Image (tube, rainbow, N blue to C red):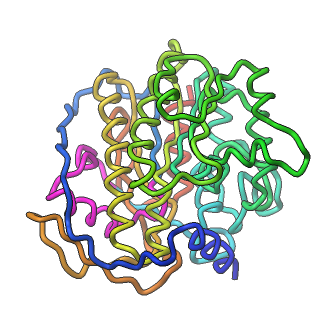
Amino acid sequence: MAFTSFAQDAYLTADSEDTEKTYNGGESYKVKTFPQKFKSDKPKNIIFLIGDGMGVAQVFSGLTANQGKLFLENCKHIGFSKTQSADDYITDSAAGGTALSCGIKTYNGAIGVNTDTLAVKTILEEAEEKGLATGLVSSSAITHATPASFIAHQKNRGMYEEIAADFLNTDIDVFIGGGIQHFTKRADGKNLLVDFAKKGYQVESDIDKIKKVKKGKLVGLTADVHTARIAERGDMLPVATETALRILDNNSGDKGFFAMIEGSQIDWGGHANSTVYIVEEMLDFDQAIGKALAFAAKDGETLVVVTADHETGGMAIIGGDMSSGMVKGAYPTAGHSAVMVPVFSYGPGAEEFMGIMDNTEIHKKMKKLLLDN
């Protein structure tokens, strides 16, 4: 069964010693309520946020930790997604990401290809063909399974250098995440960042420099492979989200844009069976969601869709305190689970994402709203 390979890959990336089951509470942040009035019935832009490994328990752990409030609560239209892959009842992030990006079921480990390993066009590529601006942001390596599935076409998710090279086959406006070594320390001896610079991209590795970019093409690679945990990386994900949306808005003109933003390490907290890790990452992801919602509320023509590729850890909340933010979790597995994951939406077209749906339907609904005339 393909499950072992992807679970092990993600688990070993996480801090395997962090098995704390109780988050004891911390400083909460203020949550803003955004208006529910929009300029049109159909979006000009879509911001698609994926909380890797984020099930309902992960969401509620974040809500409890922030003393009863999340930016996510602005999304009044809510549904559920079935995540099974073509070859397994329990999906991995590659097949789950490809279902969301391409609208097809494929095998675990597949990046933007079908069960015959043939490339299938992603929504990001289709948006580019229509003249929209496009972007990817991730708190993992940008070559990791979920972001890769929106821009690359490889038979195996572990082909990081090939995935990095696939970025050059597109006209993506901005991508921010880890993974420098997949572009520069390669078996073929190439430095792909030189090629990006020749194509007119500004290439940066310092988040303080990245966040100052307002328009044009940007490659922002913030870590050698994966970005670190919150204590070290700080607010990289919300800052990168705000930066990418500003660039896309300035680049898009009257065409609009498509952006995928991933909160990667909720998944790794689940693999580590660490409530502390999950809560840290859930709160960070929610603040990135807050940046997306703030943009959408001001713009009035932007649809925000938030979901997960799968749930990780089978997390159960067995204790907590809304007033202190304490959360106690329990876990039956260190791998992924098969349960449905939530789908939240805000903005024009949000009502399309209600009820129980297959993960491939999320792709089809976004494509219909954004790209079909």
Instruction: Name the residue: 48% across, 60% down.
Output: 265
- Position of residue 118 in the picture relative to residue 277 (left or right): right
Residue 307 drawn in magenta: no
Q: Percent x, y for residue 306?
A: 40, 49
Left or right, 322 with respect to 221, comes to left
When the figure is inspected, residue 180 is found, relative to residue 158, above or below; the finding is: above
Q: Residue furthest left?
A: 323
Specify whether residue 66 is painted magenta.
Answer: yes
**Residue 199: x %, y % from top left:** 76, 21
Image x and y of residue 137, in percent:
53, 41
The x, y position of residue 232, in whole percent, is 44, 52
Above or below 202: residue 25 = below
- Taking the spot 54% from the left edge, 51% from the top edge, the residue there is 227
Residue 99 visible from this viewpoint? yes
Q: Nearer the viewer, residue 159 or 239?
A: 239
The image quadrant that residue 292 belongs to is top left
Quarter holding residue 364 = top right
- Is 137 situated left or right of 81 in this image? right
Name the residue at the top extreme. 253
- The image quadrant where one finds the C terminus is top right
- Asked whether the viewer can see residue 149, the reply is no
The stretch in magenta equals 51-78
Image quadrant containing the N terminus: bottom right
Q: Nearer the viewer, residue 247 or 150?
A: 247
Which residue reaches farthest bottom? 332
Corner quadrant of residue 55 = bottom left
